[in-house]
Amino acid sequence: MSCLKQTYEINKSDALLITDIQKDFLPGGALPVSGGDEIIPALNWYARFFESAKGYVFASRDWHPANHVSFKAQGGLWPLHCVQNTKGANFSPDLILPGDTGVISKAMDPKKEGYSVFDGTLFADELRIRGVKRLFVGGLATDYCVVNTVIDSRKLGYDTVVLMDATMGINVKPDDVDKAIQAMLKAGAQQATMVDFSDAVEKLTTAQDAPDAMEEESSERAAVKKKSRMRPKGSSKRVRTEK
Ligand code: VGL
Ligand code: ZN
């Protein structure tokens, strides 16, 4: 019997992009994505995994000026959200990012709506400088930031993989997320979930067994359904800020 299942091997030509895990996009926030918090354990797992495998980790943030065109007061679609330097624009405290995570701020031009992390940012340059060839994308929202970022990523020639167990959409119309997924596939993106990294999970488990894994039964571990070392909370929250 042949094995048809693809397993991704991650190295320094790979990058993980975690989009917009900010308080305003989570339950209780100004523009909450229903169930948006449920993907955080998976994203934490991917971040930890990419760090261990020497892949790069990036986190984007929607980072609007208060007079941004996307807001209803300016004729846009959305309530005020992710305004620069407000609490709602902060990353979720539940998101655990490696210390050298690259933070990309987006949608900062007051006159221009921009959902893609490539739009008006230095993200493509950051990837090129590092020699990244393949981009794995998870986060919020599937039908805005994620779909536009993935399509741009394909246009720029990156192999692009959507992390289906680590993204959630808004569905302003009920089939928006389905359409977004179709559009990403049409653009040549692949789809993956944590099990597609399972060989590497075994390696991670055996190589990094540590007593602090017992610290708490995390939802992250439950989600992965494999024993894998849990980084103690707070040990890797610092992120590199932009110049
Ligand atoms: C987004 C709605 C409003 C996104 C940004 O990046 O997904 N969605 N602003
Ligand atoms: Zn926005």
Image: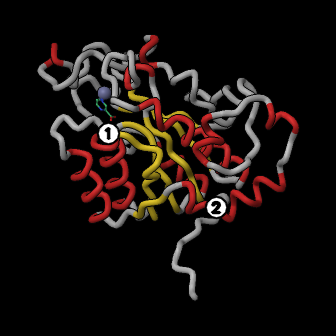
Give the number of callouts.
2
Find residue 1 and name its label.
none
Q: Is residue 222 above or below residue 24?
A: below
The foreground one among 42 and 11 is: 42
Give the quarter of the figure containing the N terminus: bottom right
Q: Which residue is mark 1?
A: 169
- Relative side of 220 to 146, left or right: right
Q: Residue furthest bottom?
A: 1
Residue at the disc numbered 2: 198
Measured from the top left, where is residue 16 in percent x and y? Answer: 55, 49
Which amino acid, by three-letter code, is at mark 2? Ser
**Picture coordinates of residue 222, whole percent (x, y):** 62, 41
**Crowding near pointer 1: few (<14 within 10 Å), some, many (20+)?**
many
Label 1, secondary structure: give it.
loop
Residue 208 sits above or below residue 86 on the image: below
Asked if 53 appears above or below 38 in the picture, the reply is below
User: Residue at position x 61%, y 48% from top?
Assistant: 224
Q: Is mark 1 within 8 Å of ligand 1?
A: no
* Quadrant including the C terminus: top right
- Spatial separation of the CA atoms under disc 1 and disc 2: 26 Å
Indicate whether 127 appears above or below 63: below
Please provide percent x and percent y for residue 202: 74, 60
Q: Position of residue 215 (x, y in %)?
A: 79, 29
Q: Residue at x 33, y 24 (%)?
A: 32
Element type where label 2 sits in the image: helix
